[in-house]
């Protein structure tokens, strides 16, 4: 009788071990929290100011002294080129329009495209000369062509800076040559670059060109990253003694595009290396996801007094969010739709807000709009809906 318990113990031991092997790992898995993506602190750069953002979602990933007003040097030409592209897009000028080169443009110092006084140069050549060769002479020539002079063109630049929300930018010339009233910030330059990329994509390829030849003079693009990183496709360099070396760059990997700005480095090599640090950090630790397509129906709330009972509600732009990699499962969305929507409703009218959260953090808000128009219903329909609405609210009040 004493042998039975011992035999039973030996026979049950393998079973107990199997059970422990099954149960213990599950218990440990419940006790130990799942690992989360670890994101290191953003890199510190050898520069006065820097900024990194996603071009599609607009999320800021890194910033340092981003709103400090600094001399932009030839980064000014981003606005000069933007205004040329805008006039092309609006049909006010064409690529083949001929621009008369004045003595004033020809005499402008600093970097040059080497246009000659008294000649006529097509707009497309001048645009290449501004972007690739950073030609001050080309910048003054287009300023005179579009606005009659550099001073009125600078006024036009400032009007558009205000329109685009560039709060720490002021222009006194089209070139970026030193001037006490000429300044910009890393944030503003990134925002301007975002407009260049998104508003006029048909002209953006120029920013990636490595060489430009005019008047038998071949000049390289000063953006060294165009040779080092195949995902970099723009935008512009700048340098003066006062400003130091600056670079606004953009790169696209898979479906994610980043814009970086570095201002006030001490060499051409330094601005390239510091920019590469920012871009590498952004692409390694973040991803941009498309959550909703433009025009997708997200809800159909009740409409009172209309010729339809429901309104299709959605977003008028693609909704994209930039989040730390491997955390997309923590994204949640909440629709805050206006209560008691009454007809008439016009297509595109705001009727609420889409709020996107990553865990407890709000990472984005977008306006919810009517995707269609709803006209007023007939008299009987409006009266019926008024009664229906009254009793709905009354019952809702009893049970609310």
Image: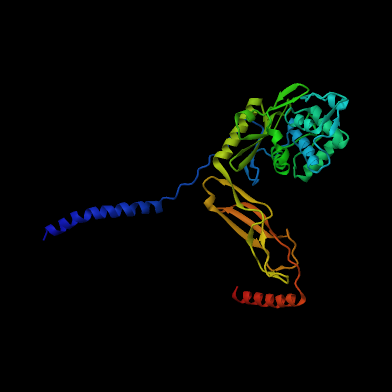
Residue 124 falls in image quadrant:
top right
The x, y position of residue 83, in whole percent, is 79, 39
The x, y position of residue 172, in whole percent, is 82, 34
Residue at 53% in and 52% down: 330
Q: Which one is in front, 82 or 97?
A: 97
Taking the view exactly as shown, the residue that stands out farthest to the left is 1
Could you tell me if residue 133 is visible in this image?
yes
Residue 261 falls in image quadrant:
top right
Q: Which one is in front, 57 or 97?
A: 97
User: Horizontal placement of 163 versus 187: left or right?
Assistant: right
The x, y position of residue 179, in whole percent, is 80, 30
Against 126, residue 329 (above or below) is below
Residue at 72% in and 23% down: 218
The N terminus: image quadrant: bottom left
Q: Which one is in front, 373 or 44?
A: 373
Could you tell me if residue 41 is visible in this image?
no
The x, y position of residue 31, in whole percent, is 40, 52
Against 113, residue 196 (above or below) is below
Q: How is the image coloured?
A: rainbow
Residue at 73% in and 72% down: 305
The C terminus: image quadrant: bottom right
Please state the total of marks drawn on the protein image.
0
Taking the view exactly as shown, the residue that stands out farthest to the top is 216
Residue at 62% in and 33% down: 275
């Amino acid at each position: 009788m004493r042998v039975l318990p011992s035999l039973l113990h030996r026979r049950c031991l393998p079973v107990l071990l199997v059970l422990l092997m099954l149960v213990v790992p599950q218990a440990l898995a419940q006790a130990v929290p799942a690992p989360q993506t670890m994101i290191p602190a953003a890199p510190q750069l050898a520069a006065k100011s820097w900024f990194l953002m996603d071009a599609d979602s607009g999320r800021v990933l890194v910033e340092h002294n981003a709103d400090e007003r600094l001399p932009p040097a030839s980064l000014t030409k981003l606005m000069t080129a933007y205004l040329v592209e805008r006039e092309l897009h609006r049909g006010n000028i064409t690529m083949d329009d001929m621009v008369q080169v004045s003595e004033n443009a020809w005499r402008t110092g600093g970097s040059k495209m080497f246009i000659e006084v008294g000649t006529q140069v097509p707009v497309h050549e001048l645009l290449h000369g501004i972007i690739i060769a950073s030609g001050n002479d080309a910048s003054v020539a287009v300023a005179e062509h579009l606005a009659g002079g550099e001073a009125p063109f600078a006024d036009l630049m400032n009007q558009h800076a205000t329109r685009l929300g560039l709060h720490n930018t002021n222009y006194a010339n089209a070139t970026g040559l030193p001037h006490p009233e000429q300044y910009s910030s890393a944030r503003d330059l990134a925002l301007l670059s975002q407009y260049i990329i998104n508003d006029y994509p048909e002209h953006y390829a120029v920013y990636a060109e490595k060489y430009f030849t005019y008047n038998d003079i071949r000049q390289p693009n000063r953006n060294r990253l165009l040779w080092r990183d195949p995902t970099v496709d723009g935008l512009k360099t700048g340098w003066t003694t006062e400003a130091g070396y600056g670079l606004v760059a953009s790169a696209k990997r898979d479906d994610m595009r980043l814009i970086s700005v570095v201002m006030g480095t001490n060499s051409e090599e330094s601005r390239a290396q510091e920019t590469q640090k920012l871009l590498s950090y952004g692409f390694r630790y973040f991803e941009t996801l498309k959550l909703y397509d433009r025009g997708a129906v997200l809800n159909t709330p009740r409409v009172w007094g209309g010729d339809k009972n429901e309104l299709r509600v959605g977003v008028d732009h693609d909704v994209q969010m930039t989040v730390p990699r491997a955390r997309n499962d923590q994204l949640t969305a909440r629709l805050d739709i206006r209560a008691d929507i009454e007809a008439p409703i016009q297509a595109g009218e705001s009727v609420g807000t889409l709020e996107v959260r990553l865990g407890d953090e709000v990472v984005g808000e977008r306006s919810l709009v009517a995707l269609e128009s709803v006209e007023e219903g007939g008299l009987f329909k409006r009266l019926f809906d008024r009664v229906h609405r009254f009793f709905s609210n009354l019952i809702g009040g009893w049970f609310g």
